[in-house]
Amino acid sequence: MLLYRFLKYWLKPGYKVYFRKIFIRGMEHVDKQKPVLFAVNHPSAFLEPTLIATSVDFDVHFMTRGDLFNRRFLWFFNATNQVPVFRFKDGFSQLKSNRDSFSECHKRLINGARLLIFCEGSMKWVKKLRMVQPGAAKLAFGTLEKKEDLPLVIHPIGLSYDDHSRFRSDLMMEIGPAIELEDYFEEYRTEPRKAVKELTAEIQKQLNQCVLHIERDEDLETGALLWTVVKNDPEFSGNNGSSPFPEVKNVLDRFNKSAESKSGILLRDKLSEYDSALKRHKLEDATVGKLSKNGLPVLSAGIFSLLFLPFSLFYLLPLWIATVISRNTMANVEFYSSVRAVLFIFFLTVLLLAVLVVMWFSPYSFFWILILSLGVGIDLRLRPYRLHLLRFFKAGGSWKPVRKLAKLRGEILEIIKII
């Protein structure tokens, strides 16, 4: 438990640096007096469990891929509340171990634990919710069979990343209302297969409300750009610091339903045209949106940010080391993103401790520590403006492509209103 708490409070401030913003909604739905099964989507390796654990004020237990369990590190998995679960591809002999794992999960839930299960059954970096597997429903019913009066509930949790492989991107975490199990369990007594199927369908339905979902595979690229455009536009997502999830969710749901309509086809064509133009001019939507509305102030802030550029080395050096190691050791984006984030926090911690030790033994140590803290904090806030400035000059330092792209962007925003 001590190791769990240490990792939780070590990772939490690190994630606040790695991500630009972490939006969390729905925490009020969770009754802290009840055992809970969290049904979570799984687009990365271990960002989801660690982000959830660092965002709540109670301990969380995790069902983890059994093939990752190594006897030499069994102490670590036990100390961090992890229970192994095996898949068909891990072999039949390993599948037999699931009986013990599920018994352990039943015991923990009966004792009041909050247990997290990745209900899609596997991880995949894709901006959609995949099919929910029956494991969560079976686990819930198996627990209730052992203690029928247990007030167990299921909460869906959806994590929607702008791009979890990108430094200083945003994350939206949605915690849905509790799925009560009493009626489902009554049906389970007489028709277990039907009850499992119906509860799984309900989890799918409720989790879908917590995830930014792009339905068709052929729409994944244009849908992701639409997500970005809506999120970056204050007219749609607001500008009050609250989560833009409801607004982006509303637009994506209408986008999914409009695949065959005239306005839907037009929107997809415009998004494809806009995407090609962005790539051609080496610009990004956020830059186009900012420059088209407040061009000179944004560029002025970008120039001003250059004064704080030396402070960026404090976080860019750990990021560079973490990126190099992750690229050379991780074969897929799901593990790359998770490993990169944790390595960044590790090397940032090492650098921070080294700098603090040096400064502590220097004259006016408090003054230098204060300057470093303020400098890094201000630089992180000004960094987006510096990136806008850099992209502007990469595009040739001309307003012509910005105006052209802004016009396309405006057409997209108008079509969104009628789909």
Image: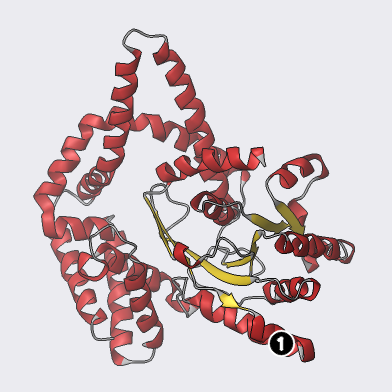
**Residue underneath mark 1:** 186
The quarter holding residue 269 reads bottom left
* Residue 86 visible somewhere in the drawing: no
Residue 100 position within the rendered picture, expressed as x and y whole percent measured from the top left: 85, 61
Q: Judging from the image, what secondary structure is the residue with disc 1 in?
A: helix
* 136 or 293: nearer the viewer: 136
Instruction: Please give the name of the residue rendered at 22% of the width and 52% of the height, measured from the top-left corner.
Output: 395
Instruction: Please give the name of the residue rendered at 50% of the width and 38% of the height, measured from the top-left corner.
Output: 344
Check disc 1: other Cα within 10 Å, few if <14, some if 14-19, many if 20+: few
Q: Number of callouts in the render? A: 1
Query: Which quadrant would the C terminus be assigned to in this image?
Result: bottom left
The quarter holding residue 67 reads bottom right
Vertical order, 328 against 131 (above or below): above
Residue 99 position within the rendered picture, expressed as x and y whole percent measured from the top left: 85, 65
Q: Is residue 180 left or right of residue 400?
A: right
Instruction: Please give the name of the residue rendered at 36% of the width and 87% of the height, measured from the top-left corner.
Output: 258
Q: Is residue 257 left or right of residue 38?
A: left
Instruction: Please give the name of the residue rendered at 62% of the width and 54% of the height, measured from the top-left corner.
Output: 60
The quarter holding residue 291 reads bottom left
* 82 or 388: nearer the viewer: 82
Residue 114 position within the rendered picture, expressed as x and y whole percent measured from the top left: 63, 60
Amino acid type, mark 1: Glu
